[in-house]
Image: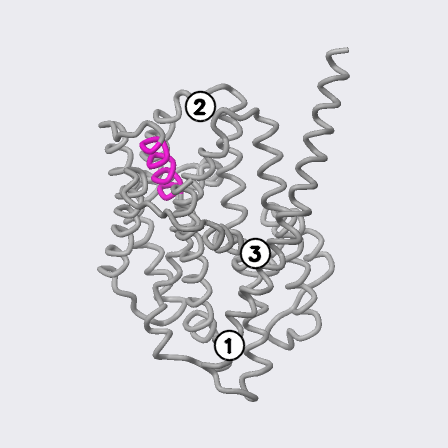
Amino acid sequence: MNRIILLDLLRFFAALSVVLFHYTFAGYMSNNTIMFDIQYIGSIFQYGSMGVELFFMVSGFVILLSSENKPILYFVTSRITRLYPAYWVGVTLTAIVIAIYGGEKFSVTTYQYLVNLTMINEMFHVQNIDGVYWTLFVEIRFYLLIFLLMLFRQMKYLKFYLLVWALISILYHIVTLPSLLNFFLISNVAPFFIAGAVFYMAYRNNKFSFLDYLILFLSFIASIMYLNKHISHMSEVFNHQFNMSIIFSILISFYFIFFAVSNNVFLINKDKKIYNVMGGVTYPLYLIHSYIGYIIFNNLYALMNKYVLLLSTVLLMILFSYIIHIFIEKKLGKYMKKQILQFIDRLAFRDKH
């Protein structure tokens, strides 16, 4: 249980880092999407985008935790009911706010909204309503890989597949691989999922094997190669130089934290409710903060102090995220999960009789 609490804290930290990166740095630096700057705070949170990579590492850990020794249909159902209810609300809220208050900087069409509801709109070459949603399609492809391993009863060979996957993620930066392979293996960000998965297996086995260390080393190398390219791209987009030494230090800190997590170094014995709430608001916060926050800034920045506006908007996003977590994720999501599993059970009963 302490494990889950700590992962909840990591997820909340990652989400808040991304929020502050967008609000204090990326929003203004990216073609003045936000029409005012907060330079001092932005200089602190300009590296907050790495919260995304931390998300992927946590996901690699948690998905194995939630899939192990579970029936495959239970895994699929849990993933669908975990992702989609809050996402549908996030997409709908974002579309409504854009349609009413988006102005010239933001726009949405009915077709774009409807296709976005599938979460796989990129396969149909339809732009995300909110730019941050690109990570969700990445997550779905990771879930698909785990699903295939479960379907073909290959989970017992998972370390072998992770080793091969890590090698491919390195080769991705050295040679030209088939685009279809890169698409399904998400070769660019794969090392973060791989690392999270290995840290989970070390936690489960209560030790690190030589193969664990080898895969982690390869995933770390692939992560550095990815971040080097990614930061170069960001430097061009934002016309701003990022310090690769800081990026490297942040990545190392991620690995050290997960090493500690896997070895049960951190123990939190206090009431866990607050930590569960922090973890619970993470996904809705990620879904609704970006474009809605930008639009709030652009419509109110002339009426109030920008620092008060920043703090108020962050707190407002957390409040709405909590509401979505309680009423959509916990209630609607659980209801959907119950109904789907009952439907599956009825089908299985009919097949037996």
- Return the x and y of residue 204 as percentages of the image width and height: 36, 30
**What stretch of residues is rendered in magenta?**
190-203
Nearer the observer, 108 or 21: 21
Q: Is residue 158 left or right of residue 281?
A: left
Q: Quick one: quadrant of the N terminus?
A: top left
**Residue 277 x %, y %:** 51, 54
Instruction: Give the residue pinned by disc 3.
Output: 284
Q: Residue at x 45, y 58 (%)?
A: 15
Question: Residue type at mark 2?
Answer: Met
Q: Circle 2: is it few (<14), some (14-19), or many (20+) Cα within 10 Å?
A: some
Question: Which mark is first along the chain, 2 or 1?
Answer: 1
Q: Which label is found at residue 34?
A: 1
Residue lying furthest top in this view?
A: 353
Q: Secondary structure at mark 2?
A: helix
Q: What residue is pinned by disc 2?
A: 155
Q: Residues within 10 Å of mark 1 (few under 14, many from 20)?
A: many
Q: Nearer the viewer, mark 1 or mark 2?
A: 2
Mark-to-mark CA distance, 1 and 3:
22 Å
Mark 1 belongs to which amino acid?
Ile
Is tag 3's residue or tag 2's residue first in the polypeptide sequence?
A: 2
The answer to whether 68 is drawn above or below residue 351 in the figure is below
Task: Find the distance from the CA under tag 3 to the CA under tag 2.
Answer: 30 Å
